Image (cartoon, rainbow, N blue to C red):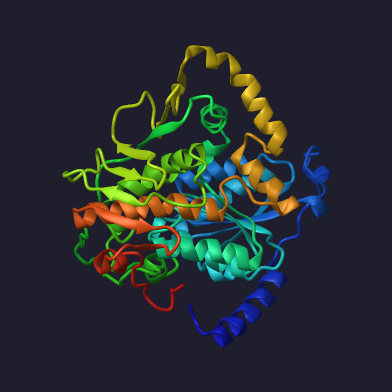
Amino acid sequence: MAKETDMTRRAFLRRTAALVAAPSIIPASALGQEERAAPSERIVLGGIGIGGRGQRVLSWMMREPDVQVVATCDVRRDRREQVKAKVDKEYGNNDCATYRDLRDLLARDDIDGVLIAISDRWHALASVMAMKAGKDVYCEKPCSMTIAESRALADTARQYGRVYQAGTQRRSEASFVFIVQLARAGMLGKLHTLTGHIMLGFAPHTWLPAEPEPPKDEVDWDLFLGPIPWRPYNRGYLGRRHNHADIWTGGIGEWGAHTFDLCQWANDSVDTAAVEYEFPNNDSGEGLVARYASGVELLMTRESFPGSCGVRFEGSEGRAECSDRQEPDVEPKSLLGERDRIVDEYVARTGRSLSHVRDFFDCVKSRRHPTANADVAHWAHTICHAATICMHLQRDVSYDPLKEAFVGDEEANRMRSRAMRAPWVL
C-alpha cells in the first residue's frame, strides 16, 4: 500500500470527486417500492469484484428492504457493466456508479459497507483496505491466502471497530445449526472425531504464454494481479482461478473455509486451532488428520457426502452429519424430533437471523459481531492454511495456537505468509 501521505492526498481528491458525482437515492415511494425503508434508514452498499457467486449474494442483499446498492467496482469493464445493469434493473433507475479501481469506491463517504467477491488473492487485502476506509465488510471465502493474512484481517476488524462477515453461509442454515447445537449441547456425548469435506488438490504454479494486453479500461491487468507477482497478460487467467496457485487458495481452503469452521463451532474451539497435522501420504489431502490439544481429531476427506460441504460430528453417545441438499442424519434417531426446538432456541437465545446476509446487516446496525466474524474466520482459515502447508511439505507439522507459529519448524513458519507485490501490501 502506498505511503500514508500519498493515500491521504489521493483519498481526499477521490472523495471530493465522488461526492460531486454520487447519485441521489430516490425515495422508495417514488419507485413504487413502498416496502423499502426510508433513505435515511438504509444501509448503503458497494460491490467489489462481483462475478457469478458475487451476483448471487448481491441478489440476496438487494432483497433486503433497508439496503441500497449504489456502486460496483471491477477491473473488467464487462463485469462492471453487467452488475450495473442488474442493480439498475432492481431499483428501476440508472444510478449505480461504476469504478475500475477499488480505492475510488472506498473513498465515497456515503457507502456504509461493501460486498467483496473478488478472487482469493484479493480477499484479505481488499477487506483490510475497506475496513481502514471505515466500511463494514461482507467477504466471500476463502477469506485469506495465508495465516498472516488471516491474522491481519482479525486485527484490522478489531482495531477499526468494523463489522466483518465471512461468506460461510452454512453457519446460518437451519440444518447445519441443528447438528452443531446438538454437539455443543453434549447430546452426542463427548466428541472424539470431526469430519470435514475438502476439495481435491492444489493449484500449480503455471505460467500461460503472453498475449497482447487489452486497454486498461477493458481489463486493468495491473490491478487484476494486485498483490501477486507480475506476469504477462493472458486471458486464461481471468476466469480460471482454480488453475493458478497465486490466485487460488487451493482445495483444502476452498471447502475447509466452510467445513472446518462448522467443526470448530461444534467443538467449541472457535478461538484456537488444531495443534498437530498428520501428512496422509498422498497428493490430495484425503485422510489428513488435524488433532486438537484435547485429543479431538479433525479428519479431512473427499468422501462422498450426499451433498457438498459435508460435516460429521462423532461423540461417545451419538453422531450427526449434514451436507448441502441433505437432511441431517443423526444417531440416535430420536434426536431428529428435537430439531425445531433446538433451532428455535438457538434463534431466540442469540437473536440471529437464519439468513447470513441479514445477520450481517443486523450487526451493521447493532455493531455486534456477526456469526462468521473476523476472529472466527481467522481460526478456521488457520487450520486450512496449516493443513495446506503440511501437504506442501509432505510431512507432519505441529502448530502452537498461542504463538501462532509452527513448533521448531523454520521451513513451515516461512510459509505462514507470502511476499506481496508493492504497493499492495498489508
The quadrant in which residue 357 appears is: top right
Horizontally, is 144 left or right of 127 in the view?
A: left
Horizontally, is 407 left or right of 332 in the view?
A: left
Tell me residue 229's x, y (percent): 31, 71
Look at the image and tell me whether residue 240 can be seen.
Answer: no
Instruction: Please name whichever residue, 151 or 118, is drawn nearer the observer in this view of the structure.
Output: 151
Tell me what residue is drawn at x 44 percent, y 32 percent: 191
Horizontally, is 331 left or right of 134 in the view?
A: left
Instruction: Please name whichever residue, 248 or 57, is drawn nearer the observer in this view of the structure.
Output: 248
Tell me residue 174's x, y (percent): 57, 28
Horizontally, is 361 left or right of 274 in the view?
A: right
Tell me residue 201's x, y (percent): 24, 46
Tell me what residue is drawn at x 31 percent, y 39 percent: 300
The quadrant in which residue 156 appears is: bottom right
Instruction: Please name whichever residue, 265 or 275, is drawn nearer the observer in this view of the structure.
Output: 275
349 relative to 71, above or below: above
Give the mark count. Answer: 0
Tell me what residue is drawn at x 66 percent, y 41 percent: 358
Tell me what residue is drawn at x 68 percent, y 38 percent: 352
Tell me residue 42's x, y (percent): 76, 51
Look at the image and tell me whether residue 382 can be seen.
Answer: yes
The quadrant in which residue 351 appears is: top right
205 relative to 188, above or below: below
